[in-house]
Image (cartoon, grey):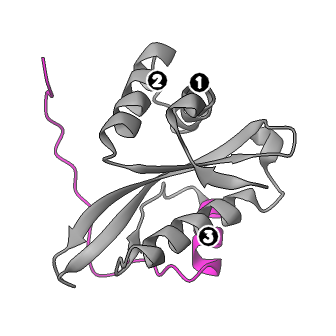
Amino acid sequence: MPIRPAVPADLADLGELFSGYLDFYRVPRPRAEVEAFLAARLERGDSVLFIARNEAGQALGFVQLYPFFASLHMAPAFLLSDLYVHPDGRRQGLAEQLMNAARAHAEATGACGLQLETAKNNLAGQALYEKLGYVRDEVFYTYWLGLPGPA
């Protein structure tokens, strides 16, 4: 399936996919809020979004990357923050294609690696990541500090 960088014209389709992603992780948000968040990412260029469409043009999946610096490697890297495939696109290798598009982008931009995290019960995702060469970290724990955010 064709995978390409997302552009503002993809916003409505990305909003639908991202809403499905949030529903999967049981944190639904109003559609207007989702689209505003994605519009800001596209406008500011502070993330890289790839969208996958079938031959008929139906949006079936996306992956979102955020750049950061891997201090221990003293080099740029990407956080593969979000990956989602619509149920209509599953079991067709689309998640793997999206992951490979993310990798190709990271390699083309000189990144030293890709980092991701996933739910402990996302066994299908874990199997895919390990198939693609990702190694589960056994040294570091992930912590989160929730803050009130902007008023």
Residue that mark 1 sits on: 12
Residue 37, quarter of picture: top left
N-term-proximal mark, 2 vs 3: 2
Q: Main secondary structure of the magenta part?
A: loop
Q: Is residue 30 above or below residue 108?
A: above
Q: Which residues are magenta?
A: 123-151
Front-most of 92 and 3?
3
Instruction: Inspect the image, locate mark 1, and give the three-letter code of the amino acid beneath it.
Output: Ala
Q: Could you tell me if residue 35 is visible in this image?
A: yes
Q: Position of residue 9 (x, y in %)?
A: 57, 30
Residue that mark 3 sits on: 100
In the displayed structure, does residue 124 sit left or right of residue 148? right
Q: Is residue 124 magenta?
A: yes
Front-most of 90 and 61?
61
In the displayed structure, does residue 126 sit left or right of residue 27? right
Q: Tell me how far mark 3 sits from mark 1, CA to CA.
A: 24 Å
Q: Could you tell me if residue 84 is visible in this image?
A: no
Residue that mark 2 sits on: 35
Instruction: Inspect the image, locate mark 2, and give the three-letter code of the amino acid beneath it.
Output: Glu
Q: Secondary structure at mark 2?
A: helix
Front-most of 75 and 125?
75
- At 56% from the left and 83% from the top, the residue drawn is 133
